[in-house]
Image (cartoon, rainbow, N blue to C red):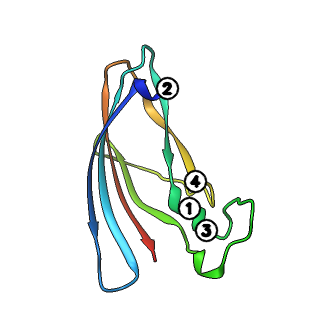
Amino acid sequence: MPPEFIYTSYKLARHYPPDRTVRGTEDITYTNASPGPLANIQFRLELNSHRPDAPRETPVQADYITSGIHIDEYTENGKVKEWNDVGGLTWQRIKLDQPLASGQSIKLTFKWHYDL
């Protein structure tokens, strides 16, 4: 879907504890500005590029490897949903409970962590 059809607003909080784990929460309001309904939303999981099972063209140094991003909780409009780990992929498609009609918004919330 072209970017001009998607509007998002973010509220992001990060916590930096004394250990090597970064934890945070993210609130996203996602508005479908396309002319048709939206049944799926695709998310980028860039930190998964650090996972040992991530597809890559060239080898990486051992200190580049981590366990990637971990989604601890995911909600749609306040309803907790199952999050299936996609392994080393840097994207994940979510099928919405109901297609999001043109002009409608959905609130998505994530609790996540990753290790440095």
Amino acid type at circle 2 is Pro
What residue does disc 2 label? 2
What residue does disc 4 label? 90
| Cβ atoms under marks 1 and 4 closer than 8 Å | yes
Mark toward the start of the polypeptide (2 vs 1): 2
Which residue is located at x 41 percent, y 24 percent?
5
Q: Callout 3: few (<14), some (14-19), or many (20+) C-alpha neighbours within 10 Å?
A: some
Distance (Cα) linking label 4 and label 2: 19 Å
Mark toward the start of the polypeptide (4 vs 2): 2
Judging depth in this view, the residue of 107 and 79 nearest the camera is 107
**Residue 79 in which image quadrant:** top left
Amino acid type at circle 1 is Asn
| Cβ atoms under marks 4 and 2 closer than 8 Å | no
Which residue is located at x 66 percent, y 70 percent?
52
What residue does disc 3 label? 51
Q: Is residue 38 left or right of residue 17?
A: right
Distance (Cα) linking label 2 and label 1: 24 Å
What residue does disc 1 label? 48
Please, what secondary structure does the residue beneath circle 1 have? helix
Foreground tag (3 vs 2): 2
| Cβ atoms under marks 1 and 3 closer than 8 Å | yes
Mark toward the start of the polypeptide (3 vs 2): 2
